[in-house]
Image: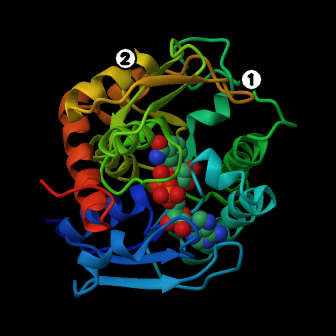
């Protein structure tokens, strides 16, 4: 419980990460305004917060200006999975770029601190491993992922221009693959995909040979990183990597999900999508030294919690038998 109650705006607050962040900020004793256009977010994610006296929700698209009095802004609004951000790529770029302009404008007007949910996708298909914040990335600006990658890169540029030009108090977090309860079940992200396929007893689709690696961060760890970053003084702007450096081949993830769910699913291979990075792993030295942060939840524990969530979700919608 914090000693001073702050008014905090969370854009994208009805999404996967946003809903966990709203929950944590309320638990810490703040007033939370959740803004979302429900493109990929769901009311179900925040239903349990609706009766909270310090929680407020507004349906709003961040590509339009917003005038509210707040002390801090967490800018998370943006579809995060390729199936969703490629559905309407022009809107994705608008959300990142115009959304950043609108939220930075608001921060400047009311003197609020603002944190951007940036992404490891700014590194593209990296030629440096693991990725440090100094690495400038290897992004294809013309490919199908560019609406997201370049939109997020431009948002970072805007954050640093507001910092230099207007002295806005900015924080940029580069988020690496994060998973946990309330991920969208059909968003095609690897963890939710595997768990949902396994629970339904379907074959597990592995893109490529499955030897491409990923590092997965559990949502509670990530949110702790956000809170610590926002609490830093004006000298800390980031960008700062927040993710779990424990790297595993995607094939191993599939095998662990099959073992954990007790599924009889087979692994089937599909071609790798265009520009899919082969390796992705954060160097979190900066988060360790500046924020005193590192992930605490191991993959087994996190996958168990995520599986319990998806099992309930699929049972409630009659897609699998309850157990
Ligand atoms: N989950 C991850 O692994 C990950 C990794 C890197 C970066 N991020 C970033 O973190 C943020 C949250 O990601 P998430 O995983 O919770 O995804 P999500 O899709 O669950 O959440 C995004 C939220 O933003 C909302 N939104 C989208 N466009 C909007 C608009 N124009 N106006 C208002 N709201 C809008 C959606 O409805 C949704 O509630 C995103 O900015 C994403 O780019 C996430």
Residue where numbered disc 1 is placed:
138
| Crowd tier of the residue under label 2, counting other residues whose Cα lies within 10 Å: few below 14, some 14–19, many 20 or above | few
Query: What distance separates the C-alpha of mark 1 from that of mark 2?
Result: 26 Å
Pinpoint residue 77: horizontal percent, then vertical percent.
56, 63
Q: Is residue 255 above or below residue 77?
A: above
Pinpoint residue 57: horizontal percent, then vertical percent.
42, 83
Q: Nearer the viewer, residue 121 or 7?
A: 121
The circle drawn on residue 178 is none
Taking 273 as reference, is 322 left or right? left
Tell me the residue at 56%/17% (across/down).
279
Q: Quadrant of the N terminus?
A: bottom left
Q: Nearer the viewer, residue 166 or 84?
A: 84
Q: Earlier in the sequence, mark 1 or mark 2?
A: 1
Q: Nearer the viewer, mark 1 or mark 2?
A: 2
Pinpoint residue 72: horizontal percent, then vertical percent.
44, 67
Taking 250 as reference, is 170 left or right? right
| Crowd tier of the residue under label 1, counting other residues whose Cα lies within 10 Å: few below 14, some 14–19, many 20 or above | some
The circle drawn on residue 252 is 2
Q: Nearer the viewer, residue 65 or 111?
A: 65
Whether residue 186 is visible here, answered yes or no, is yes
- Spot the residue most to the right: 142
Taking 138 as reference, is 70 left or right? left
Tell me the residue at 19%/38% (across/down).
304
Taking 208 as reference, is 90 left or right? right
Answer with the quarter of the image where residue 61 lies: bottom right
Whether residue 237 is visible here, answered yes or no, is no
Whether the residue under disc 1 has CB within 8 Å of ligand 1: no
Pinpoint residue 258: horizontal percent, then vertical percent.
29, 28
Tell me the residue at 62%/12% (across/down).
128
Q: Is residue 252 above or below residue 36?
A: above
């Amino acid at each position: 419980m914090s000693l001073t109650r702050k008014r905090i705006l969370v854009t994208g607050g009805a999404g996967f990460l946003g809903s966990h962040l709203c929950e944590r900020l309320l638990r810490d004793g703040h007033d939370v305004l959740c803004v979302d256009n429900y493109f990929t977010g769901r009311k179900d994610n925040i239903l349990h917060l609706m009766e909270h006296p310090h929680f407020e929700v507004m349906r709003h698209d961040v590509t339009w200006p917003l005038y509210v009095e707040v002390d801090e802004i967490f800018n998370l609004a943006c579809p995060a999975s390729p199936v969703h951000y490629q559905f309407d790529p022009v809107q994705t770029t608008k959300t990142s770029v115009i959304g950043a302009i609108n939220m930075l404008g608001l921060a400047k007007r009311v003197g609020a601190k603002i944190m951007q949910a940036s992404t490891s996708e700014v590194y593209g298909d990296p030629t440096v491993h693991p990725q440090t914040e100094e690495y400038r990335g290897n992004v294809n600006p013309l490919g199908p992922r560019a609406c997201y990658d370049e939109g997020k890169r431009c948002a970072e540029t805007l954050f640093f221009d507001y910092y230099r030009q207007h002295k806005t108090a900015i924080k940029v977090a580069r988020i690496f693959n994060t998973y946990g309860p309330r991920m969208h079940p059909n968003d095609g992200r690897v963890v939710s995909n595997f768990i949902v396929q396994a629970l339904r007893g379907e074959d597990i689709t592995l893109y490529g040979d499955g030897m491409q690696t990923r590092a997965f961060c559990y949502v509670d760890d990530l949110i702790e990183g956000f809170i610590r970053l926002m609490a830093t003084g004006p000298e800390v702007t980031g960008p700062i990597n927040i993710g779990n450096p424990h790297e595993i081949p995607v094939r191993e993830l599939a095998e662990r999900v099959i073992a954990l769910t007790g599924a009889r699913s087979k692994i089937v291979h599909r071609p790798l999508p265009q520009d899919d990075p082969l390796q992705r792993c954060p160097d979190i030295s900066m988060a360790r030294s500046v924020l005193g942060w590192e992930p605490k939840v191991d993959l087994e524990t996190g996958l168990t919690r995520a599986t319990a969530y998806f099992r309930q979700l699929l049972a409630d919608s009659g897609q699998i038998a309850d157990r």
